[in-house]
Image (tube, rainbow, N blue to C red):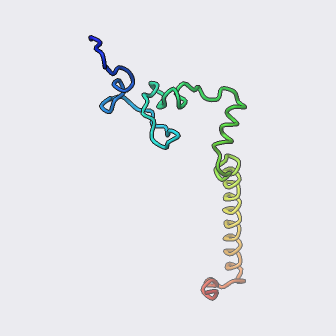
């Protein structure tokens, strides 16, 4: 390749509109998508965290997890508590069904006692 006066060599020609590679896609301060090339396997360019290894310590991972938590509805503790409450509700409903069957069997309740409630 011969260099001539006025050649445009650099990012403008290397990463022009017809470039087939993957673009960064992060939003710039102007709100437009970044047009720089990604670091292979990362999905972001150098300026937008492509070389980041992420948090390496447990404290760093906990901090990132806390920052990404928008509400507490889906935490492990909340899901476990919801599961425990659901199991308790199933146990109570089963006990009520047994009591209803016993009351009907002993004649304390009419077999169609629910029809009179509505």
110 or 10, nearer to the observer:
10
To which quarter of the image does residue 54 belong? Answer: top right
* Number of callouts: 0
What is the residue that sits farthest to the top in this orientation? 2
Q: Is residue 55 left or right of 29 when viewed as pictured?
A: right
Residue 113 versus residue 52 in the image, above or below: below
Quadrant (top left/top right/bottom left/bottom right) for the N terminus: top left
> What percent of the width, then of the height, locates residue 59?
72, 31
Residue 43 drawn at (x, y percent): 47, 31
Q: Position of residue 91 (x, y in %)?
A: 69, 62
Residue 49 sits in quarter: top right
> Which is nearer the eye, 34 or 57?
34
Q: Residue at x 69, y 27 (%)?
A: 57
Where in the figure is residue 51, as x and y percent of width and height? 54, 24
Front residue (pair 55, 111)? 55
24 to the left or right of 3: right
In the image, 3 versus 88, the foreground residue is 3
Whether 87 is drawn above or below 106: the answer is above
Q: Residue lying furthest bottom in this view?
A: 116
Q: Residue at x 62, y 83 (%)?
A: 114
Pick the quarter of the image with the C terminus. Answer: bottom right
Q: Residue at x 45, y 33 (%)?
A: 24
- Compared across the picture, whether 113 is left or right of 15 comes to right
């Amino acid at each position: 390749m011969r260099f001539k006066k006025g050649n445009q060599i650099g990012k403008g020609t290397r990463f022009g509109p017809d470039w087939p590679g993957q673009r960064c896609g992060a939003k710039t301060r102007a709100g437009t998508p970044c047009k720089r090339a990604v670091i292979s396997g990362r999905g972001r360019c150098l300026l937008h965290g492509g070389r980041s290894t992420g948090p390496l310590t447990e404290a760093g991972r906990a901090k990132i997890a806390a920052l990404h938590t928008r509400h507490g509805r889906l935490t492990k503790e909340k899901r476990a508590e919801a599961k425990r409450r659901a199991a308790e509700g199933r146990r109570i409903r089963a006990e009520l069904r047994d009591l209803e069957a016993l009351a009907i069997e002993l004649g304390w309740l009419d077999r169609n006692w629910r029809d009179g409630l509505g």
